[in-house]
Image (cartoon, rainbow, N blue to C red):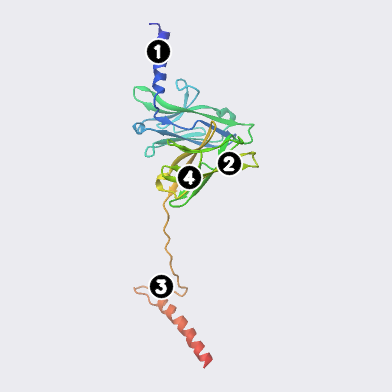
Amino acid sequence: MAPHLLLVLHILFFLAGLSGKRGVSTVRHVSLKQGGSITIPCLYDLRYRNSVKYWCAGSSILGCSSVVHTDHPKTSGKTSISDDINQRVFTVTMTSLSSSDSDYYWCIVERKNKAGDGDRLQISADITAYIPGLYVDQQEVTGVVGQNVTVQCYYSEAGARGRWCRMGGKCLLNSGTLDGTSVTLHQQTNIVTNGNVLMVIMRALRMVDTGWYRCANGYYQMPVHITVNQQTTKQNTITFSNTATCDHFPCTQPLLSFIMAPLVSLLELMIYNS
């Protein structure tokens, strides 16, 4: 068989493998202003927990150029990668974005004796855009168990509706629940940007709500990480102003002063009225 036919068959078998269920997932298209920063989460299956992860630039997984990977190097220029094997997500952070960073990228995990498994996204860093297609005030939001947390997603396409999704899970177009947590969605008009705002309120937070979410509008998506912390317990203490340093327990001077002060005042009042 001709060599070029073998190459074609190899590519077809490779693409057939990619057409099945992928073990890696990320967002689709992120729009940013020049000079901004972005953190991209790449979720992966349990079977890839100990695999090497790559961040690769290029439209095709076959010919993309590796930028950083989790074994070495973890940082290259303004791009860094980290892997949380417990949450099964590796994240890539790009800073000081410029128009030259606008490209297709791949989240890829290495597979032994097989082509890498991956998912593709597009990053647009537009030097001329005043307002990105979809953005948030901050990608990292912190909440407390039992309390609410609010995220605001801004998008420039007036009249469109935004969605709130748990990455790797389902999406909400209207108020509802995500994995048992109540979520309220408010679609509003932003007069300043002539666009819309999706206000997301996650209520009565639980520890299991910690994770990656995304705002979505049309083809644009923006990842948001929510961290839920336990409530801190504060103890109320009474401090006496007239205290003493005691070498031995019990120390009676603070208690004695606490009792004697009102008695002295009462005695003075009785003498004054007599």
* Residue 80 in view (yes/no): yes
Q: Quadrant of residue 1?
A: top left
Q: Earlier in the sequence, mark 2 or mark 3?
A: 2
How many other residues sit within 10 Å of disc 3, few (<14), some (14-19) or many (≥20)? few
* Badge nearest the viewer, 2 or 1: 2
Q: Which mark is residue 183?
A: 4
Residue 251 in the image: x percent, y percent? 37, 75
Measured in 3D between alpha carbons, the distance from the residue under mark 2 to the one under mark 1, in whole angstroms, is 48 Å
Q: Amino acid at mark 2?
A: Val
Q: Quadrant of residue 123?
A: top right
**Callout 2: few (<14), some (14-19), or many (20+) C-alpha neighbours within 10 Å?**
many
Label 2: which residue? 197
| Of marks 4 and 1, the one in the foreground | 4
Give the residue pinned by disc 1: 9
Residue 72 can be seen in this image? no
- Label 2 secondary element: strand
Residue at 39% in and 39% down: 87
Question: Are the residues flagged by discs 2 and 1 in contact, CB closer than 8 Å?
Answer: no
**Mark toward the viewer: 4 or 3:** 4
For label 1, the SS is: helix
For marks 2 and 4 on the same chain, the one whose residue lies earlier in the sequence: 4
Vertically, is 154 above or below 7? below
Of residues 61 and 190, the one nearer the viewer is 190
Residue tagged 3: 245
